[in-house]
Image (spheres, rainbow, N blue to C red):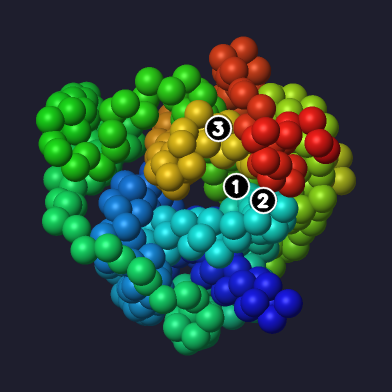
Amino acid sequence: MTDLKSRWLALYVLCLGDLMIVLDSSIVNVALPSIQADLGFSQSALAWVVNAYLLTFGGFLLLSGRLGDLLGNKRVFLGGVVSFTAASVACGLAPTASLLVVGRAVQGLGGAAVSAVALSLIMGLFSDPGERAKAMGFFGFVMSGGGAVGVLLGGVLTGLFSWHWIFLVNVPIGVGVWLAARRVLPGDEVVPQRARIDVLGAVLVTGALMLSVYGIVSSTWALLGGSAVLLAAFVLWESRTAEPLVPLRLFRLRNVVVSQVVGVFWAAAMFAWFFLAALYLQQVLGYGALEVGLAFVPTSVVMAVCSLRVSDKLVMRFGIRPPLVAGLTLAAISLALFSQAPVGGDFAVHVLPSMLLLGAGAGIAFNPVLLAAMGDVEPHESGLASGVVNTSFMMGGALGLAVLVSISTARTESLAAAGTAPLEALNGGFQLAFAVGAAAALLAAVAGGVLLRPKPMVMPELEPDLPDPYPEAV
């Protein structure tokens, strides 16, 4: 019993560290108007406060996982917590827009280290299938519910104090996680290897995605072309290097590839929803930061319930595909409702239904995406598969946010040039972006429902292990 308690204590520490990381993908959303006014960001450049974090996070997830294999997961986790905490101080005290973006990029590096090895550590802590299922459910809630909790916390801190505290609050949490992790995480058992670390692969893929996002924001075809060249170079390098960051054979596995496609479209819709919904509430409806944070409470609550109590039961009863499609469809409906929100919108009529639907959809759909991806791979490659899908998820969020913010800005400028009132023009841009986001979520649902061919990958793992010669002795 003591051993079980110590393992669950270690799980709580890992989840707290990962929650700190996940929160920072959305905690800035409510504070963006305050940051913009304070540091002089333009409307399109403002998205880089979010994108700088998402890009380095997603770009270095796989490299961080490889470092965990070579140097030890505990060591990489602790190093990630230290660098993330230090970068949070730099962000909280940043005097200029450029320094804040740089600080956010460094935060993403530390976040990648923490998040990449947390899942591996959890898999190592819980070998019993039943315990592992419960632990993964808890971890799934942290991953899926962290975004909504981040918006809530961001609103409270910005409303009661200032935007600086959305970063500085990480300092005591980071210190606490580092101290606790040193005591409760198992020691590293690293087998000495001479394997190379594919730094070039990580640099190529991250550079390609950063160029693509910047090219989308600035509408520069040359940058998009450069991104395509770097991406091609990445694929070529991965096919020739002895120790690739991403073994290309992984992309021969149907469910892994489909899960990545689903993750890209879903993340594009979801990250844009958090970003644009916060701006709509503040800039169109005139909510204060604290009011915006409180407005996201229903999303947080529903997402928590669906992640912890509903998603696993639906997967157990219906398999992977039905809950995945249902959750993503609910998310699409949520965005479609927000695309109709008017300038004088009422919270109960135009905001709350979308909040509830997105919370339910995201809470139900997150676990099936990971389970679908890992169903095709061998157990020793499950961390790599989840890392690939997480990378697609983060990159999809960054690219989707850039695209939808660009669409919103272009639509607003077009309406303003046609003589539409400023507030109406601003809301018109938001409405079009929400509609495109709804289409992205619907595409994710269709891709998952039509293209996934899930095997019975969850049910057997949740049943007691039985000797092979007696398969009927249940």
Of badges 2 and 3, nearer the viewer stands 2
Of badges 1 and 2, nearer the viewer stands 2
Q: Amino acid at mark 1?
A: Phe
Q: Residues within 10 Å of mark 3 (few under 14, many from 20)?
A: many
Tags 1 and 2 in contact by the CB under 8 Å rule? no
Left or right, residue 28 beside residue 127: left
In the rendered image, which residue does mark 2 sit on? 129
Task: Give percent across and percent down for residue 258.
Answer: 50, 23
Left or right, residue 372 beside residue 325: left
Q: What element does badge 2 sit on?
A: helix
Task: Give percent across and percent down for residue 396.
Answer: 44, 36
Q: CA distance from mark 3 to mark 1?
A: 30 Å
**Which residue is at the far top?**
450
Q: Nearer the viewer, residue 100 or 314?
A: 314
Q: Report the residue at 61% width, 23% height from top.
A: 454
Q: Amino acid at mark 3?
A: Gly
Q: What element does badge 1 sit on?
A: helix
Tags 2 and 3 in contact by the CB under 8 Å rule? no
In the rendered image, which residue does mark 3 sit on? 375
Left or right, residue 233 beside residue 412: left
Quadrant in the rendering for residue 247: top left
Q: Earlier in the sequence, mark 1 or mark 2?
A: 2
